[in-house]
Image (cartoon, helix red, strand yellow):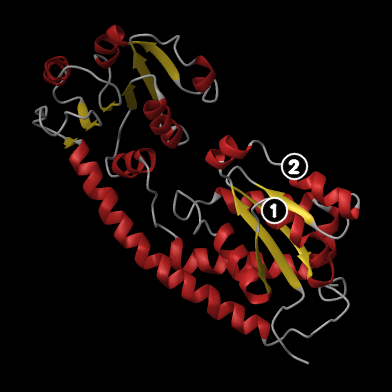
């Protein structure tokens, strides 16, 4: 009898560090599954930094439902499970809307999980639908971060020789991370030796003392200056005046950048209020894309459900 994918069950939960602080660390999900089924049988776990998802079928789900519910997992079945998976790997449930990394993580999980390989068609359907949704609804959606916005702004300025970032903290690192694959990045700060563990993740980025920025800029034809640390407006203005004609863009992320703006006669000046406005506008655009993507996911799921048959003995031959 033709029906929805009733055999498929997914248990899922998002990371909740605050809850763990109150009740203590939860037992490892994988250990719970192996205590019930043994290794690599009955159900299998996909874990990212933000969530855990346990995949199983209706035949085995009742054996783990109580244990997983105690651990904070929620249960979805059939077509809802398909919708959930496509939404997750499309980045529709990620803090950064439409992120692409999650799809790669899912592919790696499937390829490295022996039990998952027995359900090749199921995983192919999920990935095919996710790619279709991304292509038709999410390409060019942008991101909700200082780094992604910085990248978008600088892409609009042709011929930049270098990008310089002032700062050594998390904000400077986030911006540098977004730009490192596209530009030559130099980071200047008062204490380059700070946060060495963080910056070790970006070995391509060159770091130097702040007092060397002025000399560095002298022999550059065109550069961008991103301010990601507290610095006096008067000092910043001196830099801009001394290198007028070389600085093509100033992206000023200081809290006071809107109330105490610098003057850039030639080139583009972006202050924090501009960033907030752009992020808000982008959020509105992304919500519209998200609505259309979610509708498309449900339409695709319904189309797939029409061709599936009921298999009362689990999902092993469902996707063989």
The tag on residue 70 is 1
Residue 270 lies left or right of residue 308; in this view the side is left
> Marks 1 and 2: CB-CB under 8 Å?
no
Residue 172 lies left or right of residue 3; in this view the side is left
**Residue sitting at x 84%, y 66%:** 60
Front tag of 1 and 2 = 1
Sequence order check: which comes first, mark 1 or mark 2? 2
Residue 160 can be seen, yes or no = yes
Q: Secondary structure at mark 1?
A: helix
Would you place residue 136 above or below residue 232 in this image?
below
Q: Secondary structure at mark 2?
A: loop
Which residue position holds label 2? 28
Residue 40 can be seen, yes or no = no
Q: Quadrant of the N terminus?
A: bottom right
**Distance CA(mark 1)–CA(mark 2):** 12 Å
Would you place residue 1 above or below residue 90 in this image?
below
Count of residue discs: 2
Q: Position of residue 255 (x, y in %)?
A: 21, 30
Q: Nearer the viewer, residue 59 or 90?
A: 59
């Amino acid at each position: 009898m033709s029906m929805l994918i009733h055999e498929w069950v997914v248990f899922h939960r998002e990371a909740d560090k605050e809850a763990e602080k109150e009740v203590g660390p939860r037992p490892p999900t994988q250990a719970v599954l192996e205590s019930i089924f043994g290794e690599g049988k009955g159900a299998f776990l996909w874990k990212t930094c933000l969530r855990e998802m346990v995949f199983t079928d209706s035949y085995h789900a009742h054996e783990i439902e109580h244990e997983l519910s105690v651990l904070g997992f929620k249960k979805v079945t059939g077509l809802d499970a398909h919708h959930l998976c496509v939404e997750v790997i499309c980045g529709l449930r990620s803090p950064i809307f439409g992120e692409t990394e999650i799809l790669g993580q899912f592919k790696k999980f499937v390829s490295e999980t022996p039990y998952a390989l027995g359900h090749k068609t199921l995983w192919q359907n999920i990935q095919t639908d996710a790619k279709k949704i991304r292509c038709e609804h999410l390409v060019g959606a942008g991101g909700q971060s200082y780094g992604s916005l910085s990248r978008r702004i600088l892409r609009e300025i042709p011929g930049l020789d270098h990008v310089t970032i002032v700062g050594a903290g998390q904000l400077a690192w986030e911006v540098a991370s977004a730009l490192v694959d596209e530009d030559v990045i130099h980071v200047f700060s008062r204490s380059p030796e700070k946060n060495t563990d963080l910056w070790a993740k970006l070995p391509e980025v060159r770091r130097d003392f702040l007092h060397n920025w002025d000399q560095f800029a002298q022999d550059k034809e065109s550069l961008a200056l991103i301010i990601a640390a507290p610095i006096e407006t008067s000092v910043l203005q001196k830099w801009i005046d001394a290198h007028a004609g070389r600085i093509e863009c100033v992206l000023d992320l200081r809290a006071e950048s809107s109330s105490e703006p610098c003057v850039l006669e030639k080139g583009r000046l972006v202050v924090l209020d501009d960033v907030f406005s752009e992020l808000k506008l982008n959020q509105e655009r992304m919500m519209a894309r998200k609505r259309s993507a979610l509708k498309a996911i449900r339409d695709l799921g319904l189309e797939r459900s029409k061709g599936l048959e009921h298999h009362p003995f689990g999902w092993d031959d469902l996707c063989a």
